[in-house]
Amino acid sequence: MLAVRNLEVVYNDVVLVLGGISMEIPEGAIVALLGANGAGKTTLLRAISGLLDHHEGEITKGSVTLDGAPINGLTPAKIVGRGIKQVLEGRRIFIELTVEENLRVGAYTDSRRAAQNLDRVYGLFPVLRERRRGVAGYLSGGEQQMLAMGRALMSNPRYLLLDEPSLGLAPLLVQQIRELIEEINRQGTAVLLVEQNATMALSVAEHGYVLETGKVVMDAPARELLADSDIREFYLGLGAEGAAKSFRDVKHYKRRKRWLS
């Protein structure tokens, strides 16, 4: 179990970004984390993966634990060694290296099983096998996202943290990413999925959390969140009858979310 307990994060000793968040990612589960830009989703992932120091951030209260043992305070390399890998928003691949060189970089904590893990990645992403000798910078956006995910899987993580994997992708590619997340999970990897595409995220997740201004405001099984009227209106763009709302309706909408009332 990967768990966050009463977590507070401050940037530059001044800005409180997370204000007492608690959540759980069970072994082998898919958990969705929803929220608007600036809600604190990426900060939460950085706190779990140990990347806060690189952004002038600090955990000032609470803990992150793996199987009951605290991991906050460990270096990112040690957290990776414990079986937690993050795929950053924007892919962040090495554009001048080949596809296979990018993948082998991801195996540095599990080099003894690099060949086995490489076969697994090529099985999940056949297009990467086809282009393994090509320069990564020439891949399409969807292929680069697959490469970033494949690189993370090269150490065979127990938990995969995905930050906006569908960002900027066409609908057909979003569906492919969705199916890949499901297959990765079927192979035994738990996933924490951060997404603004709430429909996609909740369609694959077992449980979901909604983050607003650094606090969890809803926490329920994914199917309940999909049926919730506030989630449907504010995150899925659907009216009370299930019809899509126009941009004008959204722009001038006045009703407050129930959790802010």
Image (tube, helix red, strand yellow):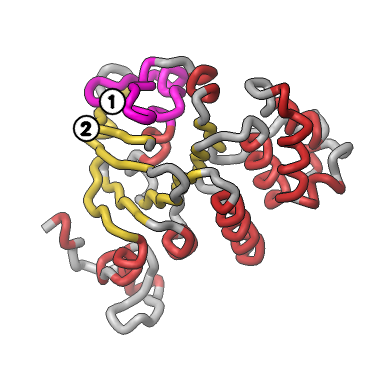
Local crowd at mark 2 within 10 Å, few (<14), some, or many (≥20)?
some
Q: Nearer the viewer, residue 3 or 145?
A: 3
Contact flag, marks 2 and 1 (Cβ < 8 Å): yes
70 to 253, vertically: above or below: above
Amino acid tagged 2: Asn
Identify the secondary structure beneath mark 2. Answer: strand
Q: Earlier along the polypeptide chain: callout 2 or callout 1? A: 2
Residue 59 forms part of the magenta stretch: yes
The residue singled out by tag 1 in the image is 63
| Quadrant where the N terminus is found in the figure | top left
Residue at image position (30%, 22%) is: 59
1 to 16, vertically: above or below: below
Q: CA distance from mark 2 to mark 1?
A: 7 Å
- Residue 95 visible in rendering: yes
Q: Nearer the viewer, residue 155 or 233?
A: 155
Q: Which residues are magenta?
A: 46-73
Q: Tell me residue 103's x, y (percent).
A: 73, 33
The residue singled out by tag 2 in the image is 6
In the rendered image, which quarter is residue 192 located in? top left
**Quick check: 231 left or right of 119?**
left
164 to 134, vertically: above or below: below
Residue at image position (31%, 69%) is: 233
